[in-house]
Image: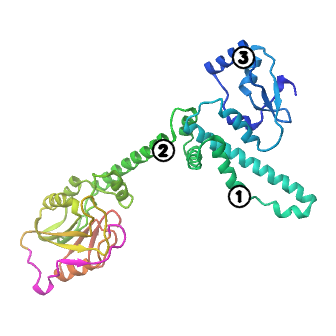
């Protein structure tokens, strides 16, 4: 193979070609001082290390010198070892290199497997050693991290970045961004996209009118989709379950309550102030409350909550329940799926106000004898 047509081995691609001022500086150095480090070749004559030096020699008409790899051990590790001491790489660049080295080592593992297949064809006793070795795969990952001076987790992050966001991977590879910065950028994009989705879902829900009905409701039961602003993490967790609404949007809903009606509305402990704004916005006045005591503790910044309040408010002159139908103010029931309220509450309200038309706001599953309105059921 002549110098004019000399090709590069794929392993040489682990390290990029120089361009612009960097290459010009290398060419000038080679012209002034000669080639100080030889160009390494594969036994088949292809360049495995020194593409930039070879290109510089040709550019300034300097005769290149060559050395040939012995063929022993891992070619990938050999090439990496030659380059790491010459290059000042960031932790992110080392991890990106580690991801590429792992791929190259995997190719070597596959090549060794094919060689075993060839041996097995002539030596039947070799057949048991033909199958790919999981141990070899694990060793490839460990070797990649070790060879590049990185760690396995960083290399794993780099691989995921290459697969999911090649644009950011290139920035890390060039040294313009660290892996933590790339991961933060991805998380920021996800949060922004989630917020856009939240706004769109909220706008759609807020714009939806309570369905027109021929009658007004004497009993209204509501579990508003409160939005939590004190923690982006909490807000995301809730939005993953259902679209939330801000307090003004909830309070502005036109609820088809009768002139004489009672409202039962759930309010979590951090949302009591907003709950009162909503019930006033719907034309009700607070009278009392019930409390749901759960079977297990939840989260909380000051106290970890194990209870939730069911506010009771009224408008007009609807009569109070018969004494025999007035329930205990404490509801003891187990927590179930996210935000679901105890089924027993329906039974309590049916017993408190038998025969009166009932509407459930923000309903998820229709119930016999009740009219429903919500984002998860057909009105």
Residue 315 shown left or right of residue 290 in the figure:
left
The span shown in magenta is 318-339
Question: Of helix, strand and loop, which one carries label 3?
Answer: helix
Q: Does the magenta stretch include residue 79?
A: no
Question: Of helix, strand and loop, which one carries label 2?
Answer: helix
Residue 353 in view here: no
Q: In this view, does 196 lie above or below 347?
A: above
Separation of disc 2 and disc 3 at Cα?
40 Å
- Residue ID for mark 2: 183
Ranked by sequence position, the earlier of labels 2 and 3 is 3
- Residue 285 lies in quadrant: bottom left
Screen quadrant of the N terminus: top right
Query: Which residue: 69% across, 37% down?
Result: 80
Separation of disc 2 and disc 1 at Cα?
30 Å
- Residue ID for mark 1: 135
Q: In this view, does 245 lie above or below 291?
A: above
Where residue 4 appears, x then y in whole percent?
Answer: 83, 22
């Amino acid at each position: 193979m002549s110098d004019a047509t000399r090709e590069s081995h794929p392993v040489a691609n682990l390290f990029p070609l120089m361009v612009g001022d960097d290459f010009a500086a290398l060419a000038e150095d080679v012209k002034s001082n000669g080639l100080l480090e030889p160009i390494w070749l594969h036994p088949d004559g292809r360049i495995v290390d020194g593409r930039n030096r070879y290109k510089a020699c040709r550019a300034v008409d300097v005769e290149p010198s060559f050395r040939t790899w012995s063929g022993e051990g891992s070619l990938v590790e050999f090439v990496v070892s030659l380059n790491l001491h010459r290059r000042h790489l960031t932790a992110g660049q080392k991890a990106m290199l580690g991801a590429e080295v792992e791929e190259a080592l995997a190719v070597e593992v596959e090549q060794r497997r094919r060689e075993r297949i060839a041996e097995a064809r002539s030596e039947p006793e070799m057949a048991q050693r033909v199958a790919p070795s999981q141990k070899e795969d694990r060793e490839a990952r460990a070797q990649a991290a070790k060879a590049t001076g990185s760690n396995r987790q960083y290399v794993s992050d780099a691989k995921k970045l290459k697969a999911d966001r090649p644009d950011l991977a290139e920035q890390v590879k060039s040294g313009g961004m660290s892996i933590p910065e790339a991961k933060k950028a991805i998380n920021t994009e996800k949060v922004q996209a989630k917020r856009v989705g939240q706004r769109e879902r909220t706008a759609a829900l807020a714009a939806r009118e309570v369905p027109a009905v021929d009658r007004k409701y004497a009993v209204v039961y509501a579990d508003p989709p409160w939005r939590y602003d004190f923690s982006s993490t909490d807000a995301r967790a809730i939005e993953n379950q259902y679209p939330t609404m801000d307090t003004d949007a909830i309070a502005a809903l036109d609820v088809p309550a009768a002139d004489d009606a009672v409202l039962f509305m759930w309010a979590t402990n951090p949302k009591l102030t907003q709950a009162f704004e909503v019930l006033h916005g719907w034309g009700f006045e607070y009278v009392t409350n019930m409390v749901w005591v759960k079977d297990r503790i939840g989260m909380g910044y000051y106290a970890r909550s194990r209870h939730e309040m069911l506010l009771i408010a009224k408008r007009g002159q609807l009569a109070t329940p018969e004494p025999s139908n007035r329930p205990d103010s404490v509801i003891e029931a187990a927590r179930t799926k996210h935000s679901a309220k105890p089924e027993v509450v329906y039974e309590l309200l049916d017993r408190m106000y038998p025969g009166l038309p009932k509407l459930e706001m923000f309903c998820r599953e229709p119930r016999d004898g009740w009219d429903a309105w919500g984002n998860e059921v057909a009105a």
